[in-house]
Image: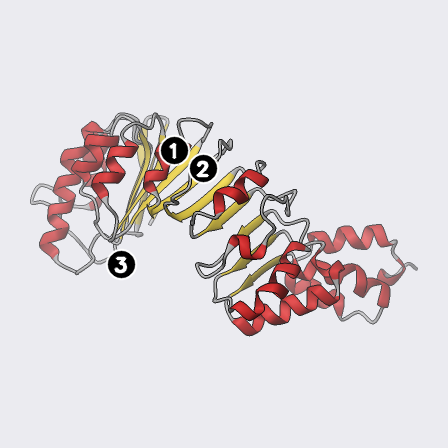
């Protein structure tokens, strides 16, 4: 009778490729050297590091055993990188030739880690980073990047890369004017935070033909402002943490303003309104329940197909009729 240890190496490799991390640990406990060396690299498919000690340990491990990084698909570094560790870190990360997703912390210098103009990651598709003037050079060397997530606007110009997905935070919203018109971005997303320059952002985005998602955090922009500039273009709109100070009067003002602005959204399909406390609310005397509010919004904005309120109720339009699909 055949046993697991007698299986061909190709079949064990396919099993390890589909296994979860917990199952991989079980496979590594099998007392068989061949199985151990086949399965071990898959343990580092997705690496997320937040502490300096963990970063040093991973880099030392990969430098000493280059085969361990052969299966790494994503690498996230969200901690601090001291100058004395940059050389080791650069050597380790550059050995991850199968990398498809790369996220670097604010303290990491792109050119300090990677040779200028060199294509280090031939398979890289997604880059997430705090933007600086160094990153355009990295993008020119990696024109195959299709998804870009940035946090602040660079001083240098962006190369003409063809993006399918672009996520810009408040400090980088002006970058939309430089990237979107010359590319085929299908999923642009803009995040607004408390420190955003909303007038600059709105002025830039008003010229964008199609804007898939806008996430407005901490009530930074009023619904009327978003409707005036982005109403004909916006497809998905999400308000996050609208009750930043827990003031009931502010909540009522917000819902009244959103209700007044909805008729100006000509293409809006999904609307999400989130609040940390998720307590019962009433936005006006005429609204007796959240459901009646959703019905009223559906009349004001006929293109709406899905509404989520306060993380407590999700309504969806199917075959022309609205119904509650989640509470």
Secondary element at tag 2? loop
Residue lying at the far left of the rendered structure? 285
Q: Residue at x 11, y 46 (%)?
A: 253
Q: Which mark is residue 276?
A: 3
Where residue 167 appears, x then y in whole percent?
41, 42
Give me the disc on residue 158: 2
- Tell me what residue is drawn at x 50 percent, y 40 percent: 147
Instruction: Please name which of the two marks, 3 or 1, marks the residue nearer to the observer.
Output: 1
Which callout, 2 or 3, points at the residue further toward the start of the chain? 2
Q: Residues within 10 Å of mark 1 (few under 14, many from 20)?
A: some
Distance Cα–Cα, label 2 vs label 3: 37 Å
Name, please, the residue furthest toward the right.
1
In this orientation, which residue lies closer to the viewer: 89 or 162?
89
Q: Quadrant of residue 156?
A: top left
Residue 272 figure quarter = top left
| Within-10-Å neighbours for mark 3: few <14, some 14–19, many 20+ | few
Residue 261: which disc?
none
Q: Identify the mark nearer the N-term, 3 or 1.
A: 1
| Disc 3 to disc 1: CB gap under 8 Å | no
Q: Which residue is mark 1?
A: 178
User: Distance between the Cα atoms at labels 3 and 1?
Assistant: 35 Å
Q: Which residue is drawn at the image coordinates 23% and 45% (left, top)?
A: 197
* Residue 139 located left or right of residue 261: right
Give SS at disc 1.
Answer: helix
Check the image and report above or below for 34 versus 179. Answer: below
* Viewer-side label of 2, 3: 2
Kindly report the distance in space between the C-alpha atoms of the residues bearing marks 2 and 1.
7 Å
Is residue 315 at least partly visible in the picture? no
Task: Find out whether the residues at labels 2 and 3 contact each other: C-beta distance under 8 Å.
Answer: no
Q: In terms of depth relative to the viewer, which is nearer, 84 or 232? A: 84
């Amino acid at each position: 009778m055949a046993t697991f240890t007698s299986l061909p190496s190709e079949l064990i490799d396919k099993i390890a490729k589909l296994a979860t991390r917990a199952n991989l640990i079980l496979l590594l406990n099998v007392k068989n050297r061949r199985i151990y060396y086949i399965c071990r690299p898959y343990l580092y498919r997705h690496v997320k590091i937040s502490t300096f000690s963990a970063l040093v340990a991973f880099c030392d491990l990969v430098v000493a055993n280059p085969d361990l990084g052969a299966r790494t698909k994503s690498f996230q570094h969200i901690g601090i990188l001291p100058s004395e560790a940059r050389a080791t870190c650069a050597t380790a990360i550059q050995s991850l030739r199968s990398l498809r997703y790369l996220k670097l912390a604010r303290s990491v210098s792109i050119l300090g880690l990677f040779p200028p103009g060199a294509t280090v990651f031939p398979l890289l598709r997604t880059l997430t980073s705090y933007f600086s003037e160094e990153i355009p050079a990295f993008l020119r060397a990696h024109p195959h990047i299709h998804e870009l997530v940035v946090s602040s606007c660079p001083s240098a110009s962006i190369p003409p890369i063809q993006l399918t997905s672009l996520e810009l935070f408040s400090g980088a919203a002006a970058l939309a004017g430089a990237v979107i018109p010359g590319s085929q971005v299908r999923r642009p997303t803009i995040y607004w935070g408390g420190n955003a320059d909303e007038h600059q952002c709105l002025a830039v985005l008003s010229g964008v033909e199609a804007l898939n998602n806008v996430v407005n955090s901490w009530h930074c922009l009023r619904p009327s402002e978003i409707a005036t500039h982005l109403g004909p273009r916006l497809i998905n709109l999400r308000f996050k943490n609208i009750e930043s100070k827990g003031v009931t009067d502010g909540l009522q003002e917000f819902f009244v303003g959103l209700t007044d602005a909805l008729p100006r959204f000509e293409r809006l399909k999904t609307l999400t309104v989130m609040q940390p406390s998720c307590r019962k609310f009433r936005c006006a005397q005429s609204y007796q329940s959240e459901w009646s509010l959703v019905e009223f919004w559906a009349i004001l904005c006929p293109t709406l197909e899905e509404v989520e309120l306060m993380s407590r109720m999700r309504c969806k339009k199917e075959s022309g009729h609205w119904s509650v699909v989640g509470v």
